[in-house]
Image: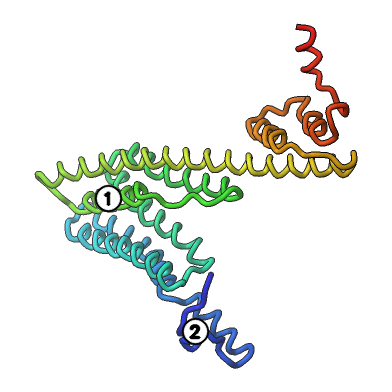
Amino acid sequence: MTGVPASATGGTGTPAPGGKLGTAAVDEASLWNVANLLTMVRLLLVPGFVVLMLADGGYDPVWRAWAWAAFAVAMITDIFDGHLARTYNLVTDFGKIADPIADKAIMGAALICLSSLGDLPWWVTGVILGRELGITLMRFLVIRYGVIPASRGGKMKTLAQGTAVGMYVLALTGPLATFRFWVMAVAVALTVLTGLDYVRQAVVLRRAGLAEAAAAAAVSQAAVAQATEGPGVVDPEAVEQAAVESAAGEPAAGEPAAVEQRVSGPAAVEPASSSEAAEK
């Protein structure tokens, strides 16, 4: 957690007295906060939703209505726990891990139940779940370079998915059954488009991270060369060019020599490319 609730510190920002007892109280309050409790409720709703969804063969309108109620509560708690955690600084390590798991668990359970009952094509379930799992894995792969923030399109995708799946959970007939098909079509389209946008952001973030690392390595290499060869003038353009070529995956053979030449003077190293140019 990045902060401690005011109630755990007496409301004044001063740590609660009592030595170890006070520390334990703060730790307990930091974990058992309202946001985490809502996340736990959402996790507990997943098996309950599955039981209600599949009760009496899975086609009883009454049981489906109760399943929809459980799904709706899970979606509402998803909105409130994140808002409370950010507003009142109740972010914890448990919440960071449990919240996305709870989100994907309730959505995945609903999609798999609907497809197993024949109400929703399996390819729709595969596209949505594949996108969610793939983006989560990608976030972990690029976390060393930075964090991909949630976009407005991602929030619209979540709203569309929740609305569409909720309409499929209910035993709708007539025009509403047709309307839910188009809502699901919009949800699938947003799922694919936002997934592609997240991939683009991950590529840009990775390139920026590699360029920054290459620039730092080039500066360090120039400093070492300067200390070895004696005082000289470091050309920033040469360092920047070496970093760009390194980040672009073009480690030219003359790159270290170019940097060293700019540091030590023209007579230090003569790149091979200059002799080739002279011949031409």
Instruction: Compare marks 1 and 2 and give the one earlier in the sequence.
Output: 2
The quadrant of the rendering that contains the C terminus is top right
Crowding around mark 2 (Cα neighbors within 10 Å: few <14, some 14 to 19, many 20+) is: many
Res 8 label:
2
The residue identified by callout 1 is 165
Q: Position of residue 66 (x, y in %)?
A: 23, 63
Please tell me whether residue 274 is drawn above or below residue 206 in the rendered image. above
Identified at 49% across, 80% down, the residue is 29
Identified at 47% across, 62% down, the residue is 98
Q: Position of residue 46 (x, y in %)?
A: 37, 61
**What's the residue type where badge 2 is placed?**
Ala
Q: Nearer the viewer, residue 276 or 174?
A: 276
Horizontal side of residue 154 vs 259, given as left or right: left
- Report the residue that reaches farthest toward the top: 280
**Mark 1 to mark 2: distance in Å?**
39 Å
Circles 1 and 2: CB atoms closer than 8 Å = no
> Could one spot residue 137 in this view of the protein?
yes
Identified at 63% across, 88% down, the residue is 20
